[in-house]
Image: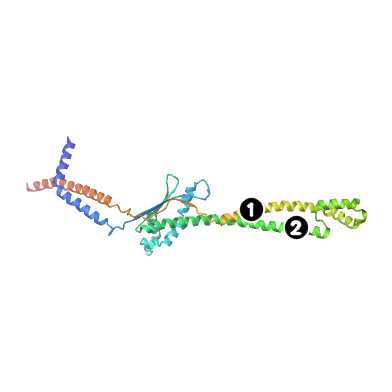
Amino acid sequence: MENYFRNLKLIQMLVKWRLHLGIVVLAAIVLSAVFSGPTFIKPKYKSYAVVYPSNIAEYSDESLTEQMLQIIQSTDIRDSIISHFDLMAHYGIDTNKEYWKSTLYYVYGKNIKISKTMYESIMIEVYDTDPQKACDIINAIIDYYNLKVRVLHNSKFSEVVHMYERHLIYKDRQLDSLNARMSELGSKYGLLDFDYQTQEVTRGFLRTVQGGSGNVNTSEVLRIKKNMEEYGGEWLMLKEIIKNEAINYATIKKEFDNAVMNLDRGYTYVNLVTPPEPADKKTYPVRWIIVTISALAALLFSIIAIGLIENARPTQRKEDLDETA
């Protein structure tokens, strides 16, 4: 019953002060509509893009999306965007003030948001007073991301290329040394084709050549036979080593060519699912929300103020009666 009378008293109070409440609410609506207009609050336009990582490999336990998020949020990409678009002047940051850099990064974070979605993609959102600039900033972020990943990859590919390059130089020198010794055995000792020469020397030594013994150069046969006995083993060993080294050289050369190809491939590292577009409608501020909240807040504070006034009146009347008595 007590609650009933309280509610009734509240309704009576609202009816009594309805004109004042109406004026306050109307004034709040008008003022909030004016002060939320473009004259006082510059409208912001939103541009966004949805991307997936591509042509990258995992570094550790993080997913490819998490790796992409780490790189795209790096300080050098942020600073490159700030420098490229002169965001310090665009956001009106005064460098003469203390902590201007912290302020700049705070405003940057409020206007440029990068996050992972529930579908393991990356959402890039940019809010700006210029819709075209918001779109351009997203495209620049993607370009700087591709550039940074390419630099990171190429630094590693360059190490691999230089490693194989040094190894190929070493193998070239080794093969040159082996071939020089083979040439020396051929020119100085007449060892050119061991298998064929073995047959011919055997036939000459046994005088089984066609045409009789008169056609056999015995001294030459004996000389080659002696050289084959002394250097034949070395010749055969060099032949096998050169064969194996040639196979190894071809394998290393193939790996070297692959490393050079990776270094010069010029890949992009983003799958652009939703490309950014300039917005044709402002995103901020939402005037109807501001006007509604302002009107409700004005009504609430007015009711509280009226309640305080109404509660103070009986006390004031009682004090006046006491003074009269």
Mark 2 sits on what residue? Answer: 179
In front of the other: 182 or 92: 182
In front of the other: 206 or 61: 206
Name the residue: 25% across, 51% down: 291
Q: Residue lying furthest left in this view?
A: 325
**Residue 85 pos. (x, y %):** 41, 61
Query: Is residue 105 something that shows in the picture?
Result: no
Name the residue: 83% across, 54% down: 231
Asked which secondary structure carries label 2, the reply is helix
Mark 1 sits on what residue? Answer: 254
Q: For the residue marked with disc 2, what is the amino acid?
A: Asn
Q: Quadrant of the N terminus?
A: top left
Q: For the residue marked with disc 1, what is the amino acid?
A: Lys
In front of the other: 139 or 28: 139
**Residue 121 pos. (x, y %):** 44, 47
Name the residue: 63% across, 52% down: 255
In front of the other: 271 or 121: 271
Query: Is residue 149 something that shows in the picture?
Result: yes
Crowding at dot 2, Cα within 10 Å, few <14 / some 14-19 / many 20+, comes out as some
